Image: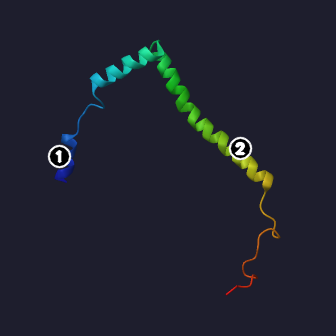
């Protein structure tokens, strides 16, 4: 139990280096040339587009499966009836 308390006490309280975060923010502002709301909007679009893309791909794949349907019994070979070749 002592290892847990020493781990908690040794853990850094800050999420990240504030100087590094400030530098990253300045570089993003230089790249996009606008205020912070542009970065928020772009990141929001990226975050929302990932699950939407996954849902669209799933729906496309489910439509393909429904078109082909399950295989007919004649199309699936019965492995029990096949003769074994030595």
Up-down relation of residue 12 to residue 77 (above or below)? above
Looking at this view, name the residue that lies furthest to the front. Answer: 86
- Which image quarter holds the C terminus? bottom right
Q: Indicate which label's residue lies in the foreground, 1 or 2.
A: 2
Question: Residue at left 27%, top 27%?
Answer: 17
- Local crowd at mark 1 within 10 Å, few (<14), some, or many (≥20)? few
Looking at this view, name the residue that lies furthest to the top. Answer: 34
Nearer-N-terminus badge (1/2): 1
Secondary element under disc 1, as helix, strand or loop, is helix
Question: Residue at left 75%, top 76%?
Answer: 78
Residue on which the image places disc 2: 60
Question: Residue at left 42%, top 15%?
Answer: 29
Residue on which the image places disc 1: 6
Question: Residue at left 33%, top 20%?
Answer: 23
Task: Tell me: 49 left or right of 9.
Answer: right
- Local crowd at mark 2 within 10 Å, few (<14), some, or many (≥20)? few
Looking at this view, name the residue that lies furthest to the bottom. Answer: 86
Q: Position of residue 24 (x, y in %)?
A: 36, 22
Q: Position of residue 21 (x, y in %)?
A: 33, 24
Residue 28 falls in image quadrant: top left
Up-down relation of residue 45 to residue 83 (above or below)? above
Q: Are marks 1 and 2 in contact (CB under 8 Å)?
A: no
In-front residue for pair 31/38: 31
In-front residue for pair 81/14: 81
Q: Position of residue 48 (x, y in %)?
A: 56, 31
Secondary element under disc 2, as helix, strand or loop, is helix
């Amino acid at each position: 139990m002592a290892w847990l308390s020493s781990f908690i006490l040794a853990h850094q309280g800050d999420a990240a280096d504030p100087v590094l975060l400030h530098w990253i923010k300045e570089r993003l502002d230089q790249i996009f040339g606008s205020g912070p709301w542009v970065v928020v909007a772009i990141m929001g679009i990226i975050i929302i587009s990932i699950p939407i893309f996954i849902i669209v791909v799933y729906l496309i794949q489910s439509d393909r499966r429904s078109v082909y349907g399950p295989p007919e019994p004649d199309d699936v070979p019965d492995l029990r009836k096949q003769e074994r070749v030595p």
